[in-house]
Image: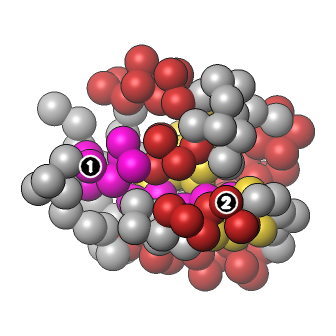
């Protein structure tokens, strides 16, 4: 059974679902510079479903468009039903705004260190699994 790392204190363990390796590298460096743990990146919703059982993380940053299409919102909803919080990190805030019920919010690209730091702290307040999902 999948479980998250205890995030009440200490560094957060963050997954990034993004298909652009240059953006992944940049965000990875910021996460680590903030004192958190970058657990890895996945480029698609399909990869998330395939690799989820072997992963442990406190929250996920998710882009809207991934290698398997506009599946970021599906990934956020899928994680939400498993009690894992997510936040969109995208250049498509207009699209992300329609999925506030399954995410903690939206960060616009390019993200700066201060906004990312504030956003990651929201992962400490985990929702429970969706009983209807």
Left or right of 76 in this view: 61:
right
Element on which disc 1 rests: loop
Q: Does any portion of residue 104 appear in the rendered image?
A: yes
Looking at marks 1 and 2 on the same chain, the residue that comes earlier in the sequence is marked by 1
Reply yes or no: does residue 27 show up in magenta. Answer: no
Q: Does any portion of residue 37 appear in the rendered image?
A: no
Q: Which residue lies under the disc numbered 2?
A: 95
Q: Residue 131: where, in percent of width, then height?
A: 11, 56
Q: Residue 24: where, in percent of width, then height?
A: 77, 42
Question: Is 6 placed above or below 77 here?
Answer: below
Instruction: Identify the residue at image location x=83%, y=45%.
Output: 23
Which is nearer the eye, 68 or 17? 68
Element on which disc 2 rests: helix
Instruction: Identify the residue at image location x=41%, y=25%.
Output: 49
Query: Which residue sits furthest top?
Result: 50
Reply yes or no: does residue 84 show up in magenta. Answer: yes
Q: Which residue lies under the disc numbered 1?
A: 81
Question: Is 68 placed above or below 24 here?
Answer: above
Quarter of the view holding residue 106: bottom right
Which is nearer the eye, 1 or 79? 79
Left or right of 76 in this view: 111:
right
Question: Is 52 placed above or below 112 here?
Answer: above
| Label drawn at residue 53 | none
Instruction: Identify the residue at image location x=60%, y=28%.
Output: 44
Q: Residue 53: where, in percent of width, then height?
A: 30, 26
Proximity of marks 1 and 2: CB atoms separated by less than 8 Å: no
- Quarter in which the N terminus is drawn: top left
């Amino acid at each position: 059974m999948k479980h998250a790392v205890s995030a009440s204190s200490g560094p957060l363990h963050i997954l990034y679902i993004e298909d652009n390796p240059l953006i992944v590298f940049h965000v990875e460096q910021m996460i680590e510079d903030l004192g958190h743990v970058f657990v890895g990146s996945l480029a698609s919703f399909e990869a998330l479903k395939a690799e989820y059982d072997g992963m442990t993380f406190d929250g996920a940053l998710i882009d809207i468009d991934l290698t398997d299409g506009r599946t970021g919102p599906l990934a956020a909803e899928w994680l939400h039903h498993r009690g894992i919080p997510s936040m969109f990190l995208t250049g498509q805030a207009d699209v992300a705004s329609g999925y506030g019920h399954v995410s903690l919010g939206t960060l616009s690209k390019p993200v700066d260190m201060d906004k990312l730091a504030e956003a990651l702290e929201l992962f400490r307040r985990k929702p429970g699994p969706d009983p209807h999902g």
